[in-house]
Amino acid sequence: MRSCWRCSLDSKPARFKDSAFSVPSRLPFVMILLALVLTAVSAFGVTRLRADTRADLLADPSSASYQDQALFADTFGGDPIVIMAQPSAGADLISPDHMLGLRRLEADLGAVTGVKKVYGPGSLVNTLAVASTTILLSECDQEGKAAAAAALARRGVAAKPQEQQDQIALQAYLDSVKVCAQRYAKAFPSLGIPAVNDPTFLRGILLEPDGQHIRPFWNWAMPDATHAIITVRMKRDATLDQVRQVLTLVRQAPSRAELKDIRFTASGAPALTSSLADAVFASLRLLLPLALLAMLVVAVLALRTPAIVAVLLAGLATLWTGGLAGLLGLPVTPATLAVLPIVIGLTADYFIQSVNRVTEETGDIRHRVGAAARRILPSTGLAALATAAGMLAFAIPPTSMVKQVAPFLASSIPLVRQFAAFMALGVAMAYLANLLVGLPGLLLLGRLRPRALVRSRLHGPAAGRLARAAVFPMAAILLLAAVGLAGWAGLPALKVETDPAQLMPASDPALLAAQSIRKEVGIAGEMDLVLKAEDAGADTTSQVPAQWLRDQTTQAVTASSGDLKRLQSLPDFLSGFNRGVLPDAARTSLILQRIPAYFSDAVVSRDHTLALSIFGLRNVTSVERDGALVQQLRSLSPPPPGFRAYPAGLAVVASDALDALRSEQVELTLLALLLIAIVLAVAYRSLTFTALALIPTVVAAGAAIGLLAFTTVALGVRSSPITVLLGGVVVAFATEFSVLWLSRFRSELAGGSTPEQAAATASGRVGPAILASALALIATFAVLAVSPVPTVRDFGIWSASDLAVATGAVLLLLPSLARAWLGRPRRVLARETPLAQPEPVPGVK
């Protein structure tokens, strides 16, 4: 196998029977059978695919920061789904039916797998009713027992029969309990009977004495008498389906009899994330078939009859990629979904190269396919291997050993690593589709319809023009290369768009809901400040740390210029039950004992080692703006000795991920290029050819970065998060096209052609196939540009643009550079071959 690979790379003719690459022509049905097995396995794997939009995808699980966020989420719950309830005109929100309905809805929401805690007015009222009843029953029960004991102790009672003694004790107990209850009712006439369906009790606990305004310490559940807020805190590992289940219950809530005149609006980070993922998934489900159709149109022009085979192969490669990803446990995210159009394009590219080579060969169809396989499979295999190696640079996990030896070798963002692994898998599947089905399919097609495998009429004119482009002026080549390389300097200027309003369709329901809630109650999201006790015995409920948390909460709200709103905190909870003053240790202990844990658990852990201050975000902002708020929280005055403070929530995780993405982008891109260089150097055994293959890739990637930077600086257009990953797309296709062109160039040199002749022949022979592949790819991505989802639309536009840049870099730069560097025939391969006349190229004399 090694000798076969080496002779293929050296472009030396190999004996047909000894070439492993001729297997598709010798055993076509075996190849197709293997493809069927892989298809069956992949079909099963697809059922195991799962969508994932968790915040965990944005943070390194082994980092200290991640551990802090995990501790926060496991204790208090993650970022919430915020549900706003509004009564219809003329309806009273604080009515027994409404509160009973809200209580039942909140109970159903809390029963959803993936929900950590639910806070809302229904649960609030029910908890207070149960607590009040429990306290009342306990007090009156004690008085009743005392009265029963006193009745039994009266003179003469002991001499009576036991049955009479029991009757006397029971009557004394009941009379005492009745008097006790009447006394409490007289002392608190405004509370009525402690029950969710008692209107007097509802108004007594929720409203100020004026009967018009909500008591301030209940504002987290009822900002005013016409708005209720239900906060559903999800577990850290909550899935997209579990978020959807919560949202479905909210949508169905008005169908309940008690809530028929209540309008519900749900938003929050999980709802926005779920809606964005759904929009991306739905858009790609619609557009991927259209992308295949666009590729088919271009392929028909380039390939004629085999075009339908290209579409079949693209579908198979996509299925195999998704199926094996499911078996490997790779999740489906908006980032990994972006791989699918790339897989479609790569598959079409490999097949077009095979068709192009088959149409060049002569003889019977078996010989033509076998000869084409021996020549094209090593080239596309090397391109696939180099591309996959470059992608795997982004997939290296940040293990402890990697962090100690070379921390720059790994991406700290799981989302990026999963994209890279998905991409590498897709490259392999695209190659396998051509190996197992593409070439055997051409053999069978050639036997059924021999005239199907002829070149398109467009091939000749394109070959002539591309051959003439091989003598592009060197001054112009150097200028283009310099411009492309200069584009790398624009990397720091790239700005990533993270504002949901810019990433999602303007009519997206979740976005409209977020804007509605912000308008009605002034809240669009959440950010948290956590105070953690580090020393043994340290207690966050003691006065000193509680006072620090109160002061820093006030300072953070003031410094935010109106972006943060004070919602809840441990100091506010304690002072709310102590007439606005932080209580001493004894009073604090009494409050925590008497007040139901339902309330205290929202702001302090059971062991008192974690305390919380919750801020509301007043606007739907970008991660960049949230990052500024995060830095403000991190720059607050240090906490008392023995304590540590840190910001928490999805806004913090996203901000840190954005910073990591920016800091790692240069190192990981350079690492990808280094791995590609190593693969090519081992294959070529020549630094000259390795450099020739890399230069167009580096120039194309730099030009793509420069274009993004220009639109950012000159036009104020920011890149979407998925667009930032396009460097991998450019590297993939520029490497692919460079390797294919150099393979033909080396073959011509080995045949005795001069560098000038070899460059012209390579451009004329393989250039049209590269151009056809590029046009098919551009058409595929251009279809995504019509998506209503800005994230998908930007990905399509920039992918198409970057592919055009990559194609131009290869077809313009590579021929001229090869002629300049190899100005005379030289020994470039392991063995010499007899001199031969270069192949004539149509359109070139």
Image: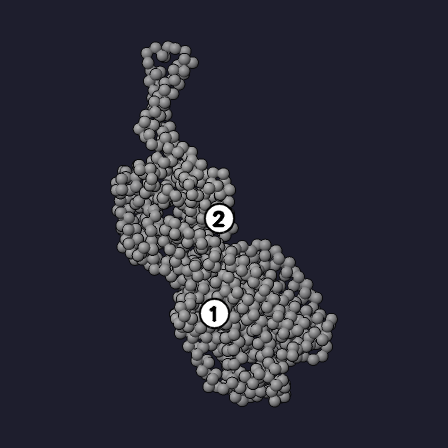
Q: Which mark is residue 153?
A: none
Foreground mark, 1 or 2?
Answer: 2
Q: Quadrant of the C terminus?
A: bottom right
- Crowd class of label 1 (few under 14; some 14 to 19; many from 20; radius 10 Å): some
Q: Are marks 1 and 2 in contact (CB under 8 Å)?
A: no
The residue that label 2 is drawn on is 247
Quadrant location of the N terminus?
A: bottom right
Lower sequence index among marks 1 and 2: 2
Residue at the right extreme of this rendering: 448
Reply above or below: 103 against 162: below
Residue drawn at x 46%, y 80% is 481
In-image side of 545 versus 309 (left or right): left
Three-letter amino acid code of the residue under disc 2: Leu
Residue 54 seen in the figure: no
Which residue is depicted at the point 70% across and 71% down? 445
- Amino acid at dot 1: Gly
In the rendered image, residue 541, in percent from the top left (x then y), is placed at 30, 44
Depicted 311 relative to depicted 164: above or below:
below
> Vertical placement of 237 versus 211: above or below?
below
In this image, 484 relative to 755: left or right? Answer: left
Q: Is residue 703 visible?
A: yes
Q: Which residue is mark 1?
A: 727
Tell me which corner region of the image, top left, top right, bottom left or bottom right, holds residue 602.
top left
Kindly report the distance in space between the C-alpha atoms of the residues bearing marks 1 and 2. Answer: 36 Å
Vertical comparison of 519 with 186: above or below: below
Q: Position of residue 844 (x, y in %)?
A: 60, 87
SS type, badge 1: helix
